[in-house]
Amino acid sequence: MATTTDDNLLRRRRRHVIGSGAVLIALSGPGQTAGFSVFVDPLTEALDVSRNTLTFAYLVGTLAASTTGGWLGRRLDRVGVGRGLRLVSTALMAALLLASASMNIVMLTVAIYGLRSFGQTGMPLSASVFVAKAVRERRGAALGALTALGGSAIPATPLLGDRLIDAFGWRAAWWVLAGIVAVVGLTMSRRIARLESDGIGAGTEAGAEHDADGDEASGLTRDALWGWAVVTAGFVSAGFVATGLGFHQIAILGERGLSSSSAAGNFVPQSLASVVTALVVGRLVDRVPARVVVPFNMAILALAAVSIGWVSSPLSAAAYGVAVGMAAAATAASEGALIARWIPAGILGTWRGRMTSVMVVSTALAPYAFSLLADATGSFTTTVRLAALVPLTVATVALVAPLPSR
């Protein structure tokens, strides 16, 4: 009876941890590209700037935000996710309020820095570090569920933002989003702080064994550093290619004969495939050798890119969308489990933050890199095929790199 009660308690705590992390990822919506996209047209009109100028401001703000991951990760290690989340929530709220008050492109660029720093980076980083530290048994499955639940909620932000803009205008829409972030974010901060005070999320999970080096904030071994570099390369590769494909999806599928409405609808199979893949891959990563995970993810990504050449109808485009969704979700669902397997819990946030910083740079540059390559080759189809070389290179390195044995 006691064992059954303990097992039920562990399962309930596990659900609380994953659910809390998923809420944080959902709160990242206002800082994600999808959440910002519905404000582009109102901003160009209100601030009297061109779309190119606004896009450049978005690039500058995003690149500046790439510095956030490192120091924020160290703070999460030092004070805990619960306390660190107070800063993230407050700063994201302030960025949304500044965005709503923007009178010129300079103010907006500063606001974008805040949105990307604490929305795109801060909320998902807090979520992944909290879940990775709190869950030791079947960690991959937990992070896969986190990716599926949190990621599936992000599309709600542009839908809500679009309705708020239509009803109240773009400035008031950002006020409402700021209020949601403040209330929900600070509530989750207190909730997570309580869980951490009970020993959940501070590097331990009741009933689970400690990693041998789990609580020592010492330097990394050579193999662990290689492991971090390989996983980071895979994470960055997936972010770069997926962002480039997503940003130019209308043009890419337009070259293959699809209408703009059909191309836009292709995001639906991508989203559905992402949810299913995250759940499946999250469970698999707990059972397969770490050596094969990154090459497997990169093979899916390369196949997704190459498959653009077979797109000629809405049906084949849907298959392409499924492949793209699978590729992005496979990496997102597995990288956290691998990093937590090799990095001591005491410095997990620091190294996870550094990885996020590199990824942010790659996603900021991806749309421009794809545009330049398309101009040089004269075709987005050729560009996408060439992009497959990025994950293939990472897969090759991952197969020969000296990774940790566990």
Image: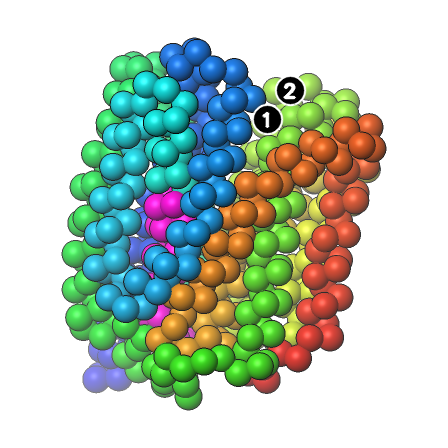
Q: Which class describes the residues within 10 Å of circle 2: few (<14), some (14-19), or many (20+)?
A: some
For disc 1, the marked residue is 264
The picture places residue 220, in percent across and down from the top left corner, at 49, 79
The picture places residue 289, in percent across and down from the top left corner, at 62, 77
Q: For residue 218: magenta?
A: no
Res. 399 image quadrant: bottom right
Q: For residue 130: magenta?
A: yes
For disc 2, the marked residue is 260
The picture places residue 45, in percent across and down from the top left corner, at 43, 11
309 lies left or right of 10: right
Q: What residue type is labelled 2?
A: Ser
Res. 280 image quadrant: bottom right
| Viewer-nearest residue: 239 or 141 | 239
Q: What SS does tag 1 mark?
A: helix
344 lies left or right of 2: right
Q: Which residue is drawn at 75% across and 59% down?
A: 393
| Viewer-nearest residue: 319 or 171 | 171
Q: What SS does tag 2 mark?
A: helix
The magenta stretch spans which residues?
Answer: 117-138
The picture places residue 90, in percent across and down from the top left corner, at 22, 44
Q: Which class describes the residues within 10 Å of circle 1: few (<14), some (14-19), or many (20+)?
A: some
73 up-or-down from 31: above or below? below
Disc 2 and disc 1 in contact, CB within 8 angstroms: yes
Work out which quarter of the rendered image holds the N terminus and state it. Answer: bottom left
Q: What distance separates the C-alpha of mark 2 from that of mark 1? A: 6 Å
Q: Which residue is drawn at 41% across and 85% down?
A: 213
Q: Which secondary structure class fits the magenta region best?
A: helix
Q: Residue at x 32, y 75 (%)?
A: 203
Q: Residue furthest front?
A: 106
Q: Residue furthest bottom?
A: 212
Q: Which amino acid does label 1 sit on?
A: Ala
